Amino acid sequence: MFLDTFKPTQFTLTASSPLLWRVAFNNPPVNAIGTAMISELKQLLTELESNQTVNVVVFESADPDFYLAHYDLAADHAATEKLPSPTGYAAWVDVLVRLSHVPAVTISSIRGIARGAGSEFVLATDLRFASLEKAILGQMEVAFTALPGGGAAGRLPALVGRGRAFEILLGGGDYSGAMAEKYGYVNRAIPDAEFAAFVTEYATRVSLWDRRVVADIKRYINKYTMLPDSEYPLHSDAFWAAAARPEFQSFTAELFKQGLQTRSDIEYHLGREVGKIFPKI
C-alpha cells in the first residue's frame, strides 16, 4: 500500500478517509520548494494518477506563517532537472501540469504565505481557499528580472482577468486573503477561526460524490479553461534564461544577505521589500 511505504520528508500525507487525503507541507524554515520536495511531489502525483479511490486531496501547511514561501533559490538546479519527468517538461512544470490533470479534485488550503512558485502551485490546483487573516499570495518574479517559470502568466488570466493578471505580475506585490478573494485569485477567504472546519467540511462533501461525475466535471472544466500543456515549458525556459543573467544573480545575492529563506523580515514582507532593492551588476 502506498500510504504504508511512502515516507516523505517534506510534507506529511494522511488519509482522512479512503476518499480524502491531506498533504501538509513541512519543510522548515519557510517551506521553500527545493529538489527534495519536488521529488516527493512527483512520487505522490504518480500514485494519484493511477489511484482509483481518492476523490479529493487537500494541500495545506504545518507552518501557520508559510504555506509555500517560493522556489528554493539555493537548490541545485541540475539535480532537480535530473528527476524523472513523465511529461518530458522541466521539473517544476512537470509537477504543475500533472497536478492539474490528476483525477482527484485538488484543494489548496492556504494559511500563510504563498509566493512565486508557491503561488504557482495553488494556481495549478482546482480550488483555492484562503484564511482571511493569514493568507498572503503574490508573484514577485518581476523584481528578479524574470517571468514566473511555472506558468502564472498562463493560469492567472483565466481566474482574475487580463488587467488584474497584469497588475499582479507587473506589480510584484503581496495580496491579502481579502484582496485575493475580491480578484478571484482564490475562490474564497474564510475567517481564520472558521477556516479549518470550512475546508474539511467542503472537502469531505466533495469526496463523497460519485467518482465518475467528479472526473467528468474536472475534465470538462479543464478543457474549456486551461492552456495546452505545451505552453508551460515556454514559461520555464524564459525563467531559467533570466536566472542566468547577472541582474537576477545580483538581486538574489542581495536578498540572501538580508535573510532570504529564513524566518526574517525579508521573507515575511518580500512583496514590499523587493521594491526597495534594485539589481546590481
Image (cartoon, helix red, strand yellow):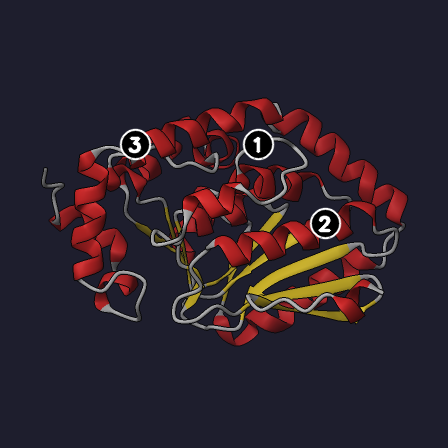
| Residue 230 falls in image quadrant | top right
Contact flag, marks 2 and 1 (Cβ < 8 Å): no
**Residue at 18% over, 36% down:** 247
Quarter occupied by the N terminus: bottom right
Q: Amino acid at mark 2?
A: Val
Identify the secondary structure beneath mark 3.
Answer: helix
Q: Residue furthest bottom?
A: 193
Tag 2 or tag 3, which sits nearer the N-term? 2
How far across and how far down the image is residue 266, in percent?
A: 23, 62
Marks 3, 2: nearer the viewer: 3
**Residue at 56% over, 69% down:** 195
Q: Amino acid at mark 1?
A: Tyr
How far across and how far down the image is residue 261, in percent?
A: 32, 62
Tag 3 or tag 1, which sits nearer the N-term? 1
How far across and how far down the image is residue 42, in percent?
A: 64, 49
Q: CA distance from mark 3 to mark 2?
A: 34 Å
User: In the drawing, what numbered circle is on residue 105?
Assistant: 2
How far across and how far down the image is residue 192, in percent?
A: 49, 72
Q: Which residue is mark 3?
A: 242
Q: Amino acid at mark 3?
A: Ala
User: In the drawing, what numbered circle is on residue 89?
Assistant: 1
Identify the secondary structure beneath mark 1.
Answer: loop
Q: CA distance from mark 1 to mark 3?
A: 18 Å
Say how many tags the image has. Answer: 3
